[in-house]
Image (tube, rainbow, N blue to C red):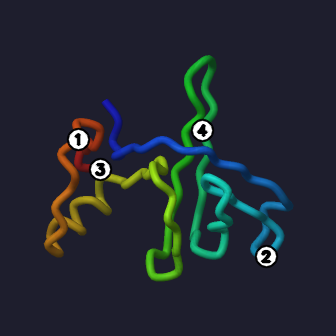
Amino acid sequence: MSKHGTQHGALHISGTGLPGGTTVQLDGKDIAAALTGLTLRICGEARPTAVLDVVLHDLATDVAEPRIVVPAKTEALLVQLGWTPPVDGEQQGDGS
C-alpha cells in the first residue's frame, strides 16, 4: 500500500541538479521554481515514482491529469486545515 496519494503524468528532468540549473517539466510545464525537493525512485520493472515537494503558491498550471503525490503527513495537515481529499480510491495514507 502506498503512503502517498498518486496521479499520473509525464515528468522530464534535465540539468545539473542545482538550483537554477535544473528544469523539471510536468506534462510540458516547467515547475522547477515551485519545487523545494524532488525524489525519484527507480526499482526494477516497476514504474518510476517521483515525489515532488511543492511550494503551492508558486505553482501555476492547467495540466489535465498530472500525477500528484501527497505525503501522508502533508495530507493529515491539510485535512486538519479543512481540506477534503479526493475519494477516487488512489489516495492512501499510512500515517507516516
Viewer-side label of 2, 3: 2
Q: Amino acid at mark 1?
A: Asp
Do labels 2 and 1 touch, CB within 8 Å? no
Where is mark 4, residue-wise? Answer: 41
Where is mark 3, residue-wise? Answer: 96
Viewer-side label of 4, 2: 2
User: Is 68 displayed left or right of 88 in the figure?
Assistant: right
Q: Amino acid at mark 4?
A: Arg
Give the residue at x 22% y 36%: 89
Give the residue at x 83% y 70%: 21
Whole-number angstrom distance, CA of label 1 to CA of label 4:
24 Å
Q: Amino acid at mark 3?
A: Ser
Q: Position of residue 41 (x, y in %)?
A: 60, 38
Whole-number angstrom distance, CA of label 2 to CA of label 1:
36 Å
Whole-number angstrom distance, CA of label 1 to CA of label 3:
21 Å
Viewer-side label of 1, 4: 1
Where is mark 1, residue-wise? Answer: 88
Where is mark 2, residue-wise? Answer: 20
- Disc 1 packing (10 Å; few <14; some 14–19; many ≥20): few
Q: State which tag comes first along the sequence, 4 or 3.
A: 4
**Secondary element at tag 2:** loop
In the image, residue 75 above or below residue 50: below
In the image, residue 31 above or below residue 89: below
Q: State which tag comes first along the sequence, 2 or 1.
A: 2
Q: Amino acid at mark 2?
A: Gly
Whole-number angstrom distance, CA of label 4 to CA of label 2:
22 Å
Viewer-side label of 1, 3: 1
Give the residue at x 30% y 52%: 72
Give the residue at x 27% y 59%: 75
**Secondary element at tag 3:** loop
Q: Position of residue 80 (x, y in %)?
A: 14, 70
Q: Position of residue 31 (x, y in %)?
A: 62, 67
